[in-house]
Image (cartoon, grey):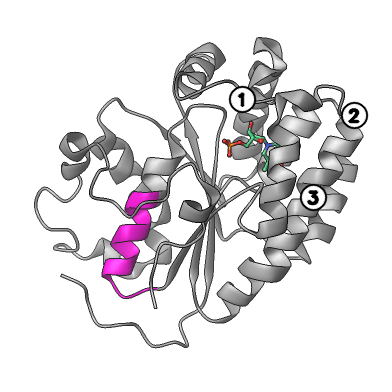
């Protein structure tokens, strides 16, 4: 049952979800959003690139297989442009009013895909991302991985529909991306917490909650979650979760106040 709304002076929290293709981030973002809303928090679920009208148009340009002539430098700047719009228009104001923002991909993806994947200069990417974010950085990053090879993840991702321009970048590209994520996690163990997807979603979800529990002290109370709370995920296939699907309009707000 929903708890009373928390006071509005609660600090905003930005949690990003990262990982290679097909790691299953969406289900776990939706599930965490639902749990936090149940405790009265305002929660915004966003995706990058996207989350604003401008960002969704940029996303379409970035992912369209028609744009296979796109230069890596243009690709980088388009990701940063979508990010600048999202941070300025949505994330910064949401954090200022005490919202929990859950973002499917953020700056680590740019380092992994455009840095390790495309071979662009990492220190330039870091500066471009800092510029786009106006100094804002995630409080926590959950790095989800399949535990298998890049091929497993790619197969899972493309099974959901036709491959997009990034998914078509090739196996070696995606292996470099996955390795880069692991290196970043090793370099920033306090911010980036690794979760390996289990075939039971309840097991993965528990690990995701553990990865953020220090940010939400109620999660550590003995009866924080009713019996079967996590196991519901194994049978419901996510059907009862807030709808934050593939379409942009579905993926920009998970309700709340
Ligand atoms: P997704 O939201 O379906 O994962 O699609 C976004 C794609 O864009 C995915 O292949 C990762 C890629 N990407 C980058 O290459 N750089 C970035 O900065 C971001 C945010 C995503």
Q: Quadrant of the N terminus?
A: bottom left
Reply above or below: 245 against 145.
below
Point 25% across, 30% down: residue: 200
Residue named by callout 3: 80
Camera-nearest residue between 235 and 243: 243
Confirm or deny contact between disc 2 and disc 3 (CB under 8 A). no
Confirm or deny contact between disc 3 and disc 1 (CB under 8 A). no
Sequence order check, earlier mark of 2 and 1: 2
Left or right: 220 as drawn, with respect to 88: left
Residue 102 screen position, x and y as percent: 50, 57
Q: Quadrant of residue 65?
A: top right
Q: Is residue 31 visible?
A: yes
Which callout, 2 or 3, points to the residue nearer the camera? 2
Residue named by callout 2: 71
Sequence order check, earlier mark of 3 and 1: 3
Number of numbered discs: 3
Q: CA distance from mark 2 to mark 3?
A: 14 Å
- Local crowd at mark 3 within 10 Å, few (<14), some, or many (≥20)? many
Query: Does the magenta segment cover residue 179?
Result: no
Q: Which mark is residue 178?
A: 1
Residue 8 screen position, x and y as percent: 44, 87
**The residue stretch that appears in magenta:** 30-41
Q: Which mark is residue 56?
A: none
Sequence order check, earlier mark of 2 and 3: 2
């Amino acid at each position: 049952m929903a708890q009373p709304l928390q006071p509005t002076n609660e600090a905003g929290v930005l949690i990003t979800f990262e990982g290679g293709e097909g790691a299953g981030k969406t289900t776990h973002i939706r599930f965490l959003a639902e749990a936090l809303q149940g405790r009265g928090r305002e929660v915004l679920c966003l995706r990058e690139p996207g989350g604003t009208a401008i960002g969704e148009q940029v996303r379409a340009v970035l992912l369209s297989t028609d744009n296979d002539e796109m230069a890596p430098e243009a690709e980088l700047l388009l990701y940063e442009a979508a990010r600048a719009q999202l941070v300025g228009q949505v994330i910064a104001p949401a954090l200022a009013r005490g919202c929990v923002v859950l973002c499917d991909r953020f700056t680590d993806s740019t380092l992994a895909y455009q840095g390790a994947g495309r071979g662009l200069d990492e220190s330039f990417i870091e500066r471009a991302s800092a510029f786009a974010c106006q100094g804002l950085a995630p409080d926590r990053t959950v790095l989800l991985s399949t535990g298998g090879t890049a091929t497993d993840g790619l197969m899972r991702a493309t099974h959901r529909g036709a491959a997009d321009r990034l998914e078509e970048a090739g196996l070696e590209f995606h292996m470099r991306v996955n390795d880069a994520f692991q290196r970043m996690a090793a370099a920033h163990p306090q911010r980036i917490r690794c979760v390996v997807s289990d075939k039971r979603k309840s097991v993965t979800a528990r690990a995701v909650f553990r990865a953020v529990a220090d940010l939400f002290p109620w999660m550590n109370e003995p009866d924080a979650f009713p019996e079967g709370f996590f196991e519901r995920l194994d049978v419901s296939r996510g059907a009862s979760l807030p709808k934050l699907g593939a379409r942009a309009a579905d993926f920009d707000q998970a309700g709340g106040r």
